[in-house]
Image (cartoon, rainbow, N blue to C red):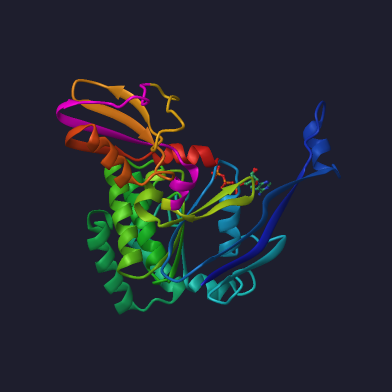
Amino acid sequence: MIEVSNIRKEFRTPVVKQGRFSGLRTLFTREYRLKEAVRGISFQVEEGEFVGYIGPNGAGKSTTIKMLTGILHPTSGHVSIGGLSPHKARREVVRNLGVVFGQRSQLWWDLPVIDSFDILARMYGVREPEKEKRMRQFAELLDLESFWATPVRKLSLGQRMRADLAAAMLHDPDVLFLDEPTIGLDVNAKRNIRQFLKRLNTEFGKTILLTTHDMDDIEQLCRRVMVINDGQLSYDGTVRSLRDTIGLPTVITVTYRGDFHIPEGYRISKEAYEPELPIRLNIIAVEDHTVTIEVNRKEIHTLDILNLLAQWGELADVDMQDPDFEDVIHKVY
Ligand SMILES: Nc1ncnc2c1ncn2[C@@H]1O[C@H](COP(=O)(O)OP(=O)(O)OP(=O)(O)O)[C@@H](O)[C@H]1O
């Protein structure tokens, strides 16, 4: 569905002169600085996938999305969406593409929301019955009814984002590019947007590429994640295996019903496990009836750990905390 092969993007910016008349001298300068924002990225996205595209500020995410949508032309390499180049066949590609930039609205600022939908429907050639049907559907799914008549500039950020999402879907594209769709939203608004995106993917089969700095978006929505670092892909795989690859510890707290006994060799210290012990774990706290340990689940099977802990006393409760996804990502960046 989406094929990206070895794309690069270079930006040429004039070198800013210092001193008197610097503005004027910069204007006439022949000196340029080259910035390679995207440095040879390749990937494929299959129909119906929901893929996260993440990376630190300035890594090249927006530049990639702009090349995918045909706004920017790659310096080299190829992009194809549904077999077509977004640059050469922009009109056809755009018909099958929905794009939402969280920082910018595609709606007309001073017009009531509903007027923007009328304009977009005309632009994309969406016929009246289809438009009506979709607007009814969106009004229900995204709760738009209460602000159809409100000018866009008066909407809250959450309302604006819901309207923008609906607008991007009005021509029923198969592919959706989202750049920070939950930026600045409160917990409730984020949840609504995520629920909607999930339904678009699972019920309506839309293919979605999501750029975000919110790791909860990624954890809750995407099975696959691509990480871009300094213009290059540094990871492309499942969220699950990214956690495993990084190998941050899982924290397990067990509560014993009565007395328990920790065998020789296991000591209460972050670093101290004896290398000859059958299972490598760190005991990080021991209280009245509870023992808290850290293990690397990449190295040890959970069942083996629980079997071992059950030998120390009668288990009453087990709590398992996987590493925080933010911490995992911090390691990749
Ligand atoms: N039009 C441009 N001219 C010159 N340099 C640019 C241009 N657009 C982007 N860049 C540079 O390219 C690099 C990648 O920028 P890009 O906006 O793609 O990053 P990003 O990953 O989307 O960052 P963020 O998370 O902050 O939005 C940055 O160093 C940026 O300054």
User: Which quadrant of the figure contains the C terminus?
Assistant: top right
- Does residue 222 appear to the left or right of 72 in the view shown? left
Farthest residue toward the left? Answer: 258
Image height check: is 143 above or below 304?
Answer: below
Residue at point 72% right, 62% down? Answer: 76
- Where is residue 186? Give x, y as percent: 31, 40
Which quadrant of the figure has residue 267? Answer: top left
- Where is residue 65? Give x, y as percent: 55, 57
- Does residue 119 appear to the left or right of 333 in the view shown? left
Front-most of residues 21 and 298: 298
Residue at point 36% right, 26% down? Answer: 266
Q: Residue 264 colored magenta?
A: yes
Front-most of residues 163 and 240: 240
Which quadrant of the figure has residue 44? Answer: bottom right
Residue 141: tell me if it is visible: yes
- Does residue 241 appear to the left or right of 41 in the view shown? left
- Where is residue 278? Give x, y as percent: 39, 38
Q: Residue 250 colored magenta?
A: yes
- Where is residue 319? Give x, y as percent: 24, 37
Front-most of residues 100 and 63: 63
Residue at point 39% right, 21% down? Answer: 269
Residue 119: tell me if it is visible: no
Farthest residue toward the right? Answer: 30
- Does residue 135 appear to the left or right of 4 in the view shown? left
Image height check: is 95 above or below 190?
Answer: below
- Counting labels gives 0
What span is colored magenta in the figure?
241-268
